[in-house]
Image (tube, rainbow, N blue to C red):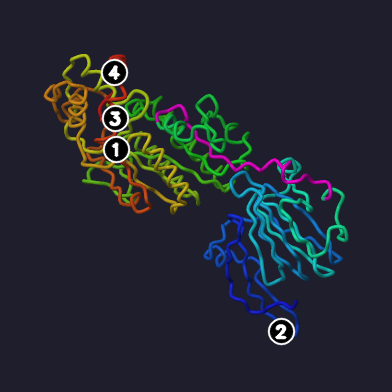
Amino acid sequence: MSIEFSKKLTAHETPIPGVVLYDLPVHGDNRGWFKENWQREKMVALGLPDFRPVQNNISFNEKAGTTRGIHAEPWDKFISVATGRIFGAWVDLREGPSFGAVFTAQLDPSQAIFIPRGVGNAFQTMEDNTAYTYLVNDHWSADAQGQYTFLNLADETAAIAWPVPLADAELSDKDRAHPRLAEVVPMPAKKILVLGADGQLGKALRELYAGEATVEFAGRADFDFTNEASFTARNWKNYSTIINAAAYTAVDSAETPEGRAAAWAINVTAVARLARTAVEHDLTLVHVSSDYVFDGSRESHDENEPFSPLGVYGQTKAAGDAIVSAVPRHYIVRTSWVIGEGNNFVRTMASLAARGISPSVVKDQVGRLSFTQDIAAGIRHLLESAADYGTYNLSNSGEPQTWADIAADVYELTGAEREAVTGVSTAEYFKGKDVAPRPLGSVLQLNKIHAVGYEPPAASGRLKAYVRSLGHPAVAASTKAESPGE
């Protein structure tokens, strides 16, 4: 079979998810031929994952009928033929519904194929002196050997129709001894690592991903942000994504010398280490931001508004956002007025209502509540929908309210009188107190998150369900007051 010259660069999907066959332009004349075996810009534009190859390997085979495989390796591969022709066979050996799926094709130098991590690769040479070349996005190491998955070339379930019968082919003893499909342990998917798993958002992510083996949770005891070893001791090759739900959020304490140092350590220095880790290991980094990166002078905030933080906490969150934005694969999820499991403004107001206390609550800060279950669901949506990387505002929807409006709603929902809540200005509420400045306007525009298919529920409905879930015993038990706007 002669090489077909001057094909158009074209991608062809196969029955195995993620395995894509490419036609390559090969330019030939009386001297021979030339091709661009790997052209990042053109191929990424065509949809090939930008898998950052680090090593180029060539397998030379003297005789037709030489057969190698089936090997599933813990890295991605981009495979083509340099000279000669092969019959290729690929079997999905990853955990999941496509386990055992088979694709076969004959390849000459005018074709190439992308094989994701965990898909078994095998080939049989159709001509003497065939050279089989592949780019990989990780360096071989002795440790990686234990992560390989193998399948017997003669497996009856895969039923690969080898052009040269295996009895007549050139095989290694190791390849002859590989297990049948029923005995293969599937290669596990790369994991999502949730950091800050004991906080309000972390608990919501635990509930959302409960029972999913591909999601790992790390609280403060499991991942110490102040310890460099937390970032270097983990085998990041086994992960695809980091969700950073951890942060220093003590807004007022951040204004003290000790708090300022702690806020910068957690919200900036540790985030820089996470960003470096994500870049070095080609991970997706999800980072949770805050309305405090703005001074609140605008009626509402879109994702492109320049930073204008008022206090130390906002400054550290803005610095962290700037760092994360340099990571090629990142989602910055900006929230406001977070409510979840734990002490928060709504729980405090419900507790005061249950005890018959009439509070003064600020009436000139405007925003929307963000319930952690919906932040968690939005993060999952961004990851699973493969939305464009970047920053997304994510609060609950509905009409913006003041903290006093929300407090009155909580009182009404618990059976108390709305009129028990007195609205005061921020200046009056904090008069004589040593506190951080608050943005008055915290309304986040939600157009961008809507455009990628996620519709956060209305805050009013979530508030009703949240207050109902507290119940009077739980409400009365919560006595810790929190400053409005934290």
Q: Is residue 265 left or right of residue 181?
A: left
Q: Secondary structure at mark 3?
A: helix
Looking at numbered disc 3 in the image, what kind of residue is underneath it? Ala
**Mark 4 neighbour density, 10 Å: few (under 14) some (14–19) many (20 or more):** many
Q: Work out whether residue 18 can be spotted.
A: yes
**Residue 184 lies within the magenta run:** yes
Looking at numbered disc 1 in the image, what kind of residue is underneath it? Leu
Which stretch appears magenta? 176-200
Which residue is the site of mark 3? 465
Which residue is the site of mark 2? 29
Q: Position of residue 348 (x, y in %)?
A: 27, 21
Give the residue at x 53% y 24%.
221
Which residue is the site of mark 4? 475
Which residue is the site of mark 1? 310
Front residue of 95 and 452: 95
Between discs 2 and 4, the one toward the N terminus? 2
Seen in the picture, residue 257 relative to 118 is either above or below; the reply is above
